[in-house]
Structure formats: C-alpha cells, structure tokens
Image: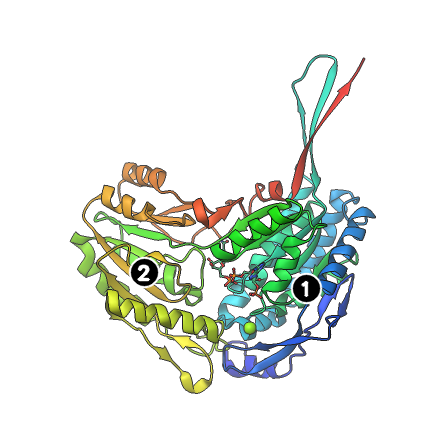
C-alpha cells in the first residue's frame, strides 16, 4: 500500500499492538498497585491504551535495578567501543521500526506523521548514534603538575540518571537525555509524560534486543508524581529534566530536600524573532516566522512566539506572514499531507484557548483564533496571530505552547534588543538583517542559548549545544558538552617518589 495516503496509516494504526506496561530490569511489568491511566489520542479523543501508573514501589524497583546494573559494571565497565556497538544496534532497530514508532508518536501526541517519520524518530536514532560514535573518541587529560606528580583528569559516569521529559517531542527529547547518559556509562530511569508515554515504552524493548543489559535502561510511565519520586529519590545521582519552568523550580527543591542530586533543566521559552528593515528576503523571513510558531502546533520550546517587526516593513511583512499562516491547516495528523496536527490533549487545548481569549481582550486578532475540527472529537486550533501594542501583554510574556503568535512593533535596534531581552526566558532568538556587523552585534546582545541569523530552527545536527539562559534552564543538551552533565570530573594525582 501507498505510504503517502491516510488510508495506509489508518490501517496500520488499527493493526498496532500497543504496550502500556512499565519496563523495569529488562521486562515489561504492570504497576505494582495494578493502577493504570487512560492514554488518549488527541486525533479523535479516543482511548489508545491503558498505561501503567507507576508510583513509589515501581520507582524504587526501577532505581534499584538501575543501581544494581551500575554497581555490577555490566554497562559502565564495558570498553566504550562495546557500548558504542550496542547503542548503534539500538539506533538501527529504531530505524528498522521507524513506521511503528512514528505511528505511536503521532497517535499519542497528535504530531503529523510526516514529521514523526522524518524528524522525531530518525532524530532520536541519530542522537543515539552520535553519542555512540563519540564515546570511544573522547579521553581525559594529563595536566601540568609538579615534576614528582602525574596528574590525570578523567570523566566517570555518575551512576543512576533519571530523565523526566515532556510530550512535545516525546522520543526525541528523551533521546537527548538517554543518548549521552548511556554512552557515558550510566544507568537510566526514564519517566515520559503521561500525555505521550508510548514511544518510550516501545524503545525500551528494542534496547534490550540491542544487547543493552537488563536494568541499564528502564521506563516508568506515570504522572508528575512519578517524576517527583525520582527527583526526591536518594539513590538517583542526577535528574535530567525537560519541561516547564514551574516544574523545573520544584525539581531543584526536591534535589535540595533529598540528596543534592545533579539537576539539569531544559525549560520554557518565549523566543523573540527580530526582523530589521534590511531583512535580506522578506518572503522567506515571513514563511520562516510562520514555521517558527506554527510548526508542531506551536508546541515548541524554541517557538518564535514573539515576532518583533520594524515599523517600516510591518504591513508588507504581516501580509506575507498571514499568507504563510494560511498554509497551516489543522487536520488529521495520520494524513501525510497534514502540516498541522492536534494539540496534545484537552487540558492543553483549554490552556491555549484561554490565552487566545486573553489575547482578544488585550491585543488585535489578525488571524485565526478558533478551535476547529470539533466533530472529529480531537483537539485542533487554527494558527493564530495577534498584533500586540504592549510588549509586556500577557500573551506576549507568558509561554503559551500553542499556535499563537504575538507581533510586536519597534522603531530602533536598541528598542528591539531591549524588548527581546525583557523576558524571564532566554532559550532562543533570531535576527534578520543584511548587515554582517549588525547581525553579530545584535547576536551578541541577545541573552539566549541559541541565536539564529537570517533563519530559525536551523541546526538539526548534534554539534550545537542546546539549552537556555536565565529561567530557560541550565546545562546543555546535544554536542559533546552534554557529556559534562552525565559525568563527574576526577583529578587523580600520582606521586612518583
Ligand atoms: P511539564 O508539565 O513541566 O512536565 C514535564 C515532565 O515533568 C512530565 O513528564 C511531567 O509529568 C513531569 N512532572 C510534572 N510535575 C512534576 C513534578 N512535580 N515533579 C516531577 N516531575 C513532574 O511540561 P510539559 O507540559 O510536559 O512540557 C512543556 C514544557 O516543556 C514547556 O514549558 C516547554 O517549553 C518545555 N520544553 C523545553 C524544552 C527545552 O529543551 N528547553 C524542550 C521541550 C519542551 P506528566 O506530564 O506526566 O504530568
Ligand atoms: Mg497522548
């Protein structure tokens, strides 16, 4: 059958066997309490599976299994080349099961199948491959020291790494944690979001198939409580988190209340996309600005949710932007032609609609603004654009995590930079200009972990560290720097005589 049709994916979905149990110590297990929660598809609001609702007994079992595996050195004790081989096998299995994993992701999170097959699942496999390929090439240092000493600086795995991740790129965000953490030799306990647990549950079995020993990679689905238990756990050495700033703040507190585990936070954003009057290509910039906020239904930590446009080009720019927005038509994400899928669940739908209501009161609605496709039973919202006169309006200040753009007008570069930096967040930013000097100067002044010049969301490869300034978090995913999060630095001083 033709993979480019809705019918193909619907048929495949109907035949899919979905696993909903936790994966602990190399096997699928129901939650010890027997409790499950409904895993619902945002495509039509219908139930997909019952998923294990893990609580303290399950979290404890998973952490103990991870600890045992670590202490037994079945993974950390391997030559990095051997870990590499098994991780590469795992990535190959992800690619082999591309359609199945992508389908789980689309059904569970409402993401377009065209994206899950081309971005999410291949991206997760690539992340695992990248860290696998890196790990047998990074060494320690022999450092200058007194003549009677040999000074070594080495990196060692931490032990048990817990990863708590969100639902917008379920398997991809998880891979940014488990890729480097496993490559470095740690054991991992992964807690996916209860809104999108299915792909994580499935790849756990593939890890075992690839030869990653039992206990080294565990998945405990459940709500925020399971995440909290991991963050409070005294035998977890590191909590790597991607999610909201509010929960990130709690995680730091849990670490402080328990064992001061290492905490790494990839949090929210309200990223400014600045278009200067000498923008080199208004057409491309407008299309890119639309993609920056409407791709993945706006459920993007890096969403270019604040568009700062110079007054001189505002009218022409907005015309083209809205033309581009019209190209995002919410529809069934199982249809390969769909560019905009469903919002992840009813809760998030209501949240986004509440922001749109707030926007109607404080800004001028230029485009969209409504829930659509309600007959489907699913959760769909039109691409929405507001012209905001006060840059500190609620919709222009708070992270919405939906397809809602605030357009802000400015008159000078200084004003644009000031508005851009006037945010609790600092995840990403962009500037459009033809002037090389202006580009570099503005990029330097923007307080953000990633700055794009004349583009947005570029850099899908692993070489760029990814993370935020200020309340967008700490530490960096991706790149060799990610290994710093999952290793301790040890100085060894050997006295020769
Ligand atoms: P969230 O509500 O903070 O949840 C993130 C994860 O934390 C989920 O697994 C969640 O479980 C769990 N959790 C909830 N309460 C917890 C608690 N008290 N203790 C421990 N864990 C808890 O965020 P989200 O709505 O899933 O994701 C959206 C957010 O993620 C946005 O703010 C977005 O910007 C951010 N994000 C950031 C990046 C980045 O790299 N900077 C990337 C993607 C997303 P349940 O969902 O099961 O409740
Ligand atoms: Mg779901």
Label 1: which secondary element:
loop
Residue 70 vertical position relative to residue 438 in the rendered view, above or below: below
Say whether mark 1 is within 8 Å of ligand 1.
no
Q: Label 2 CB, ligand 1: below 8 Å? A: no
Q: Which residue is mark 2?
A: 394
Q: Report whether 34 appears left or right of 171.
A: right
Q: Residue 220: which disc?
A: 1
Horizontal relation, residue 295 to residue 316: left or right: right
**Residues at circles 2 and 1 in contact by the CB criterion of under 8 Å:** no
Color theme of the render: rainbow
Q: Position of residue 450 (x, y in %)?
A: 43, 46
Labels 2, 1: front one: 2
Residue 192 showing in the rendered view:
no
Residue 427 visible in this rendered orientation of the protein: yes
Q: Please tell me whether residue 38 is drawn above or below residue 314 in the rendered image.
A: below
Q: Is residue 464 left or right of residue 291?
A: right
> Residue pushed farthest front?
257
* Disc assigned to residue 26: none
Measured as percent of width and height from the top left, residue 65 is found at 78, 57
* Gap in angstroms between the C-alphas marked 2 and 1: 36 Å
State the image quarter where residue 385 is shown: bottom left
Q: Is residue 488 left or right of residue 441?
A: right
* Residue in the image at 30% along x and 73% along y: 368
Question: What secondary structure is marked by label 2?
Answer: helix
Say which residue appears at 35% left-offset and 49% top-offset: 423
Neighbourhood count class around disc 1 (C-alpha, 10 Å): few under 14, some 14–19, many 20 upward: many
Q: In this rendered view, identify the residue nearer to me: 482 or 158.
A: 158
Lower position in the chain sequence, tag 2 or tag 1: 1
Q: Residue at x 33, y 45 (%)?
A: 421
């Amino acid at each position: 059958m033709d993979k480019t049709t809705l019918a193909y994916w619907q048929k495949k979905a109907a035949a899919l066997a979905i696993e909903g149990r936790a994966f602990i110590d190399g096997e699928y297990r129901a939650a010890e309490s027997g409790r499950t929660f409904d895993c619902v598809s945002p495509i039509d609001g219908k139930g997909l599976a019952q998923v294990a609702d893990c609580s303290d007994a399950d979290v404890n079992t998973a952490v103990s299994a991870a600890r045992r595996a670590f202490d037994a050195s079945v993974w950390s004790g391997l030559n990095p080349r051997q870990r590499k081989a098994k991780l590469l096998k795992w990535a190959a299995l992800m690619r082999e099961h591309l359609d199945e994993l992508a389908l789980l992701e689309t059904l569970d999170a409402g993401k377009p199948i065209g994206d899950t097959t081309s971005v999410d699942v291949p991206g997760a496999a690539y992340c695992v491959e990248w860290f696998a390929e890196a790990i047998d090439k990074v060494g320690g240092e022999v450092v200058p020291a007194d003549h009677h000493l040999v000074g070594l600086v080495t990196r060692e795995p931490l032990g048990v790494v817990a990863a708590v991740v969100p639902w917008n790129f379920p398997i991809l965000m998880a891979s940014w944690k488990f890729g480097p953490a496993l490559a470095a030799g740690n054991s991992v306990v992964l807690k996916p979001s209860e809104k999108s647990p299915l792909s994580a549950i499935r790849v756990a079995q593939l890890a075992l198939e690839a030869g990653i020993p039992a206990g080294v990679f565990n998945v405990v689905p459940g709500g925020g409580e399971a995440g909290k238990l991991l963050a409070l756990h005294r035998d977890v050495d590191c909590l790597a988190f991607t999610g909201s700033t509010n929960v990130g703040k709690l995680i730091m507190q849990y670490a402080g209340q328990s064992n001061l585990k290492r905490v790494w936070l990839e949090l929210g954003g309200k990223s400014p996309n600045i278009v200067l009057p000498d923008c080199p290509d208004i057409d491309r910039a407008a299309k890119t600005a639309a993609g920056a906020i409407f791709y993945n239904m706006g459920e993007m930590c890096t969403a270019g949710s604040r568009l700062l446009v110079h007054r001189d080009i505002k009218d022409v720019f907005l015309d083209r932007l809205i033309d581009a927005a019209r190209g995002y038509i919410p529809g069934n994400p199982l249809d390969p032609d769909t560019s905009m899928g469903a919002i992840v669940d009813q809760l998030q739908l209501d949240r986004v609609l509440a922001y749109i209501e707030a926007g109607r009161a404080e800004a001028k609605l230029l485009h969209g603004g409504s829930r659509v496709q309600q007959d489907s039973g699913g959760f769909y919202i039109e691409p929405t654009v507001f012209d905001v006169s006060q840059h500190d309006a609620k919709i222009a200040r708070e992270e919405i995590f939906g397809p809602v753009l605030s357009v802000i007008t400015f008159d000078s570069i200084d004003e644009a930079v000031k508005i851009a930096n006037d945010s609790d967040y600092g995840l990403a930013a962009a500037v459009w200009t033809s002037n090389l000097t202006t580009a570099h100067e503005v990029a330097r002044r923007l307080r953000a972990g990633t700055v794009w010049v004349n583009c947005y969301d570029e850099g899908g490869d692993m070489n760029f560290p990814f993370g935020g300034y200020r309340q967008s978090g700490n530490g960096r995913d991706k790149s060799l720097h990610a290994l710093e999060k999952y290793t301790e630095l040890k100085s060894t001083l050997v006295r020769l005589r």
